[in-house]
Amino acid sequence: MRVRVGIVGAGPAGLLLSHLLHLAGIESVVLERQSREYCEDRVRAGVIEQGARDVLIESGLGERLKREGLFHGGVALRFAGQSRRIDFVALTGGKGVTVYGQQEVVKDMIAARLAAGGHVEFDVPDVSVHGIETTQPKVRYTDNAGHAQELVCDFVAGCDGYHGICRPSIPPEVLTAYERQYHFGWLGILAQARPVSDELIYVNHPRGFALLSMRSMSIGRIYLQCKPDEDPEEWSDDRFWDELDRRLEGVDVVKPERGRSLRPKDVTQMRSWVSEPMQYGRLFLAGDATHIVPPTGAKGMNLAIADVSVLSRAIAAFYENGSTELLDRYSEICLRRVWKAERFSWWMTTMLHQFDDKSPFEQRLQLAELDYVTSSRAGSESLAENYVGLPFE
């Protein structure tokens, strides 16, 4: 089969790229190793930057987002027995973020692609890419009927995550990886519990970090800093809520409602990782296939959206006038934003979590940093500007 763009991965990056290309009149095929149900049910990030929200709405994917998404005009940072709010709207000229689960974004994207007759295949486990250094790369796979298929493409987009097959298809000597491992994780619960606040709350406590987030005004998504190898099955609901109460001690806050778990608890691993470049020949990587951020800064899905916004424009320019300027600069353009998001996520992580190897001096510096950020307009403005999202290029 001849197709202009072969896309591996039906997460936010791959689906949005296919949708944006469709709007530009460019045909694509999306291949996903997991089932549609798995993709639509996978609980991931839930904070959407202003720029990412604008992309979704302007491309026709935002009707349910506008109805059900929760606009947040700020966040609270709680430390040393006090709570201080960062006012995004006042500090950024009216911008904020929207809480809307990544799985809901994926549902909207899949529905839009299928409604438009888009070619999206799920349960395709044996995808491979070939000839990416040529002008006609190929994607081979076995379809749901068991038949061997081959896509002959102009371009291949690797949107298949860290464990995908696209990045390993690039010669290893071409790639350089940068990584920072954190020796803790996030134990998360999705609970039928009304949030204690209508905005996110970040907690720095001697017992460990906590984040009080939500998916709606009746469903809470809450995280506790934990050991990276923590077994979530050892945590009953009561044990989880008891520990959250301890980490909120000393702060004037309404006690969290203890709702039942809506799904098994999970542990999110914390790491910063970037693989450069994001392109090789006719293969272009996007999203978690080429960079991962710790979730403290709420940047993962937003970076994926930013990547494919650039890539879709670059591919469209190629078909409109034969220009390869944007394609050639894809890595350069995206990595500028990626590294700024990595910096912000690293900074938020180091400012809010407890580290076993931190000296008492460093712990005091951490509290001084929180005090400065929340009491200085310049400090608050920097956090707000990065949190709501730097401009898309």
Image (cartoon, rainbow, N blue to C red):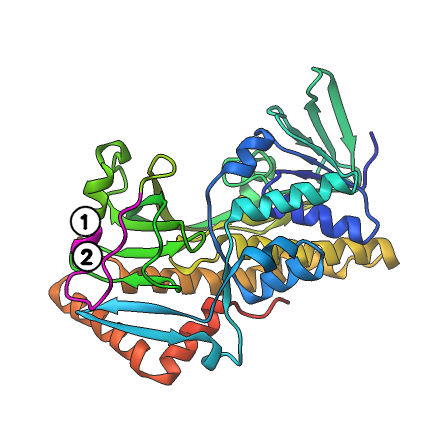
- What range of the chain is rendered magenta? 243-259
- Residue under label 1: 243
User: In terms of depth relative to the viewer, which is nearer, 311 or 255?
Assistant: 255
User: In terms of depth relative to the viewer, which is nearer, 351 or 64?
Assistant: 64
Quadrant of the image containing the C terminus: bottom right
Q: What element carries label 2?
A: helix
Q: Is mark 1 on a helix, strand or loop?
A: helix
User: In terms of depth relative to the viewer, which is nearer, 15 or 312?
Assistant: 15
Q: Are marks 2 and 1 in contact (CB under 8 Å)?
A: yes
How packed is label 2: few (under 14 Cα within 10 Å), some, or many (20 or more)?
many
Q: At 82% across and 47% down in the image, what residue appears?
A: 26
Q: At 59% across and 65% down in the image, what residue appears?
A: 51
Q: At 37% across and 50% down in the image, what residue appears?
A: 221
Q: Residue furthest right?
A: 321
Q: Does the magenta stretch include residue 251?
A: yes
- Marks 2 and 1, how far apart at CA: 6 Å
Left of 121 or right of it: where is 342? left
User: In terms of depth relative to the viewer, which is nearer, 72 or 321?
Assistant: 72
Left of 239 or right of it: where is 40? right
Q: Which mark is residue 247?
A: 2
Does residue 267 appear anywhere in the picture? yes
Image coordinates of residue 244 in percent, x first then y, are 22, 52
| Amino acid type indicated by mark 1 | Glu
Image coordinates of residue 203 in percent, x first then y, are 26, 62
Secondary structure mostly seen in the magenta stretch: loop
Give above or below for 215 relative to 131: below
Q: In which quarter of the image is residue 372?
A: bottom left
| Amino acid type indicated by mark 2 | Arg
